[in-house]
Amino acid sequence: MRNVKTVGLVGGGVIGGGWAARALANGLDVVAYDPADGAEEILRGKVANAWPALEQVGLAPGADQGRLTMAGSIGALAEAADFIQESAPERLDLKTRIHTEIDAAAAADVIVASSTSGLLPSDFQADCSHPERVIVGHPFNPVYLLPLVELVGGRKSSQQSIDAASKFYASIGMYPLHVRNEIDGFLSDRLQEALWRENLHLVNDGVATTKELDDAIVYGPGLRWAFMGVNRTFALAGGDEGMRHMLRQFGPALKLPWTKLEAPELTDDLIEKMVEGTEQQIQGTGIAELERLRDQCLIAIMTALGDFNEGAGKLLKEQRERLGQAE
Ligand code: NAD
């Protein structure tokens, strides 16, 4: 793969905006394409909202919001970019069409990654003449702070493309996780979806409010997950005997079963309960303000974890050291 100086972003919404902010903060040029009315203003607004957090995390030499330009078409973008990240709406037909268009215009050594949350790269590459460079690079919101990016190859993706994309993502402070099997939903969203389904059931059945369910995570398991994940956490639940004792003790509950797994029907009533509940929770705070609060909390958590060389904190510490901004 070529040296990446210009990142091409197809789609400038929540995720495209996050990619733009991360790439610009790392001293790269960004060229973006989004057909929506007012897309440029919206995208620049997203980058500006993220910038204070990025200044705290550390900007690379030359990092400048002004290095973002808009392209008039996917073709023009593909000709200008050294690495392309597609973050268009989550619709297979649209994404497949976009990938065919990118493929026709981008040089063969340009990697094309999709931000999709769970669609398969084999589908995107089906009509491409260079399918080997088409992969999934699934990030997490906010892309400019959370380091995880899941890399998934399709049937025709080459290992070189996965390796080159891993190297590029690592160079902009990310943690590339290779999902070795091409499965729907990848790893992280499958885990998140299991929790989400149960969350919806508990609201639907009138068992708990959205706030009570958030409290059930925020004051407890959420704190552990940030640095131990599910499995290391549960290994400790087994005391000195670790996972074996944990499974002996709590395994039978799996058969009861506590959880439902099948998603509930998204009825109007359930949608209203979810919307009303979360509106009450964020009452008086605008979304942009809440995003800035989230960013501050994430930076604080990652900075604290850096002292212990754990998880995302270790990565942030290494990035700050690279930039000569270690505290
Ligand atoms: P979004 O709705 O915020 O943004 C999508 C953008 O794509 C919009 O700005 C829209 O104008 C633009 N668009 C529409 N048609 C287009 C076209 N033909 N070419 C280029 N751009 C076009 O959605 P999002 O949340 O940013 O999601 C984008 C992708 O990222 C999806 O594949 C989604 O699954 C994935 N993703 C989302 C999240 C999340 O938390 N929102 C997390 C990880 C991955």
Image (cartoon, rainbow, N blue to C red):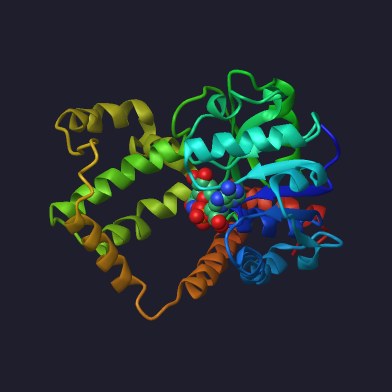
Residue 274 appears in which quarter of the rendering? bottom left
Point out the image quarter for the N terminus: top right
Q: Residue sitting at 44 percent across and 40 percent down?
A: 189
Residue 29: horizontal and vertical position, in percent? 81, 55
Tell me if residue 210 comes above or below residue 151 in the rendering. Answer: below
Residue 114 seen anywhere in this rendered image of the structure:
yes
Q: Residue sitting at 32 percent across and 40 percent down?
A: 194
**Image check: 34 left or right of 170?**
left
Residue 93: horizontal and vertical position, in percent? 49, 36
Q: Residue sitting at 51 percent across and 24 percent down?
A: 182
Most distant residue in the bottom direction:
284
> Looking at the image, which is closer to me, 27 or 252?
27
Residue 4 appears in which quarter of the rendering? top right
Q: Residue sitting at 64 percent across and 32 percent down?
A: 100
**Image check: 265 left or right of 308?**
left
Tell me if residue 90 comes above or below residue 123 in the rendering. Answer: below
> Looking at the image, which is closer to me, 141 or 55?
141
